Image (cartoon, rainbow, N blue to C red):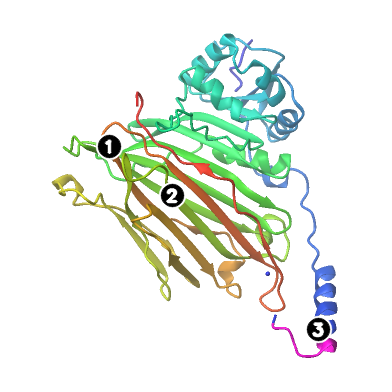
Amino acid sequence: MNLNRKTARRPATYLVILFIVLSVALIALATRPSQPEAGAHLADVNLDSLTILHVGGGDLATQLVDRLEAAGGQVVRSPDVPEAADLSPDVVVVFGGEWFEQRAYDTELHSFLSVASSRGAGLIMAGASTSRFFEALDKARVYIMAVDERTGEARNPAHYNPPVVGYRIKEVGSHTGPSLLFSSGSSPDVLAESLVEWLPHTTAAVLSEPYLQYTGEYIFSPLLDSDPHGRLDVIATVYGLESDDVSDYDWYFYQVTVRSVPGMVAYDSAWRSDHTWAHHQVHNAGTDRWMDNYGPGTSGGTDTVYVFLTPLGTPIGSVWYDPLNWSYSIDDVVVLARRDYSKHRAYWQHDIDRAATVARDTYVSMPGFVVRTRQGYPSFVDAWYQVQFVRRPLWWSTQTTGPSPTLMLDAFRVGD
């Protein structure tokens, strides 16, 4: 096989109430969103250089592959574990979920996963119990799941079984680490769009060389998807502090990108963004791991908010004088920081002015935090996210799509 081709003030009288109800109903009919054409989000994508190796059939996997093929991807189909000789970063392997679930403990599959990963190919499982994907990667020693030392249980990042999951090695500067995809789209088109965004078109820079080393990233795209209200995407990128000259502790820096895509953008509807929530909790904190720092603080009335992260709770060495820092726009947005060191919690709300332009467009917030662990211990973080969309700035109804399932944003060095 050749893979070279690659939510009113209620008025006092019932008449006014009836008027408002009828008005809203008429508005709803007049502004009922039109449905986008199938594959519209992929119309401008050219996948000529990508080869899709489709293994084991499967309804969802087949629909996903069909969309990628329509965008130019070259498809090779295999009913069983294929040869791995021609795998490369230009290849993405899409496994049918039902087939993969039955073969999750097959040593032949484990060997294929090991070789495919080492050669840079992307690995996708679509449909069925996708938590089995990470069980198989663990067995193949491709992605070692962190184990909760108190319970002895492995922390499977796909424990809630999203429809599509993926794994690939990403290069960031001179460092490499896993990039994990979790997609809960409501349609094959949304799932295909998420996959295309995840593929390695660009490479981000290391945030602070040489002391922060890229450890990995969790991409939840989309995490929440409600047609016609909108979608929520989350990307958590993790960096480990290196060359700190401290032998007792390790530090992990989390940069979290929360992207609210209102129905006006996602589904050509009348729904706007109104509020987002991002809640992070250090798991089993206080003995082996602690919430060490976070940002931003409560802010409003400015155009931009700045985040500065440094390790706390220990003498500062010269390598930490330059903090990890970034900024993001809060024009017509109020940041409410509900953080608490004692509870090892980093929690933010972003209150978006529903009448402003920002509510109509995709809005991105980027909070961050630092977790300190005992030397050689993994960072365990449980996270929840939520978004609220609003239909109109007056006489509105709301739809809260969430909260999300518990997400495990764990970080650990190879060999931990």
Residue 48 colored in magenta in the image: no
Give the residue at x 73% y 57%: 228
Give the residue at x 71% y 42%: 189
Numbered badge on residue 374: 1
Residue 182 shows in this picture: yes
Numbered badge on residue 17: 3
Residue segment shown in magenta = 9-16
Q: Residue type at mark 3? A: Ile
Left-right relation of 307 to 196: left
Residue 367 shows in this picture: no
Numbered badge on residue 124: none
Q: Nearer the viewer, residue 67 or 413?
A: 413
Which quarter of the picture shows residue 195?
top right
Say which quadrant the N terminus sits in: top right
Q: Nearer the viewer, mark 3 or mark 2?
A: 2
Instruction: Give me the C-alpha separation between circle 1 and circle 3.
Output: 60 Å
Precedes in sequence: disc 1 or disc 3: 3
Question: Outermost residue, front direction?
Answer: 150
Contact between marks 2 and 1 (CB within 8 A): the answer is: no
Q: Which residue is mark 2?
A: 281
Say which quadrant the C terminus sits in: top left
Residue 11 colored in magenta in the image: yes
Q: Residue type at mark 2? A: Gln
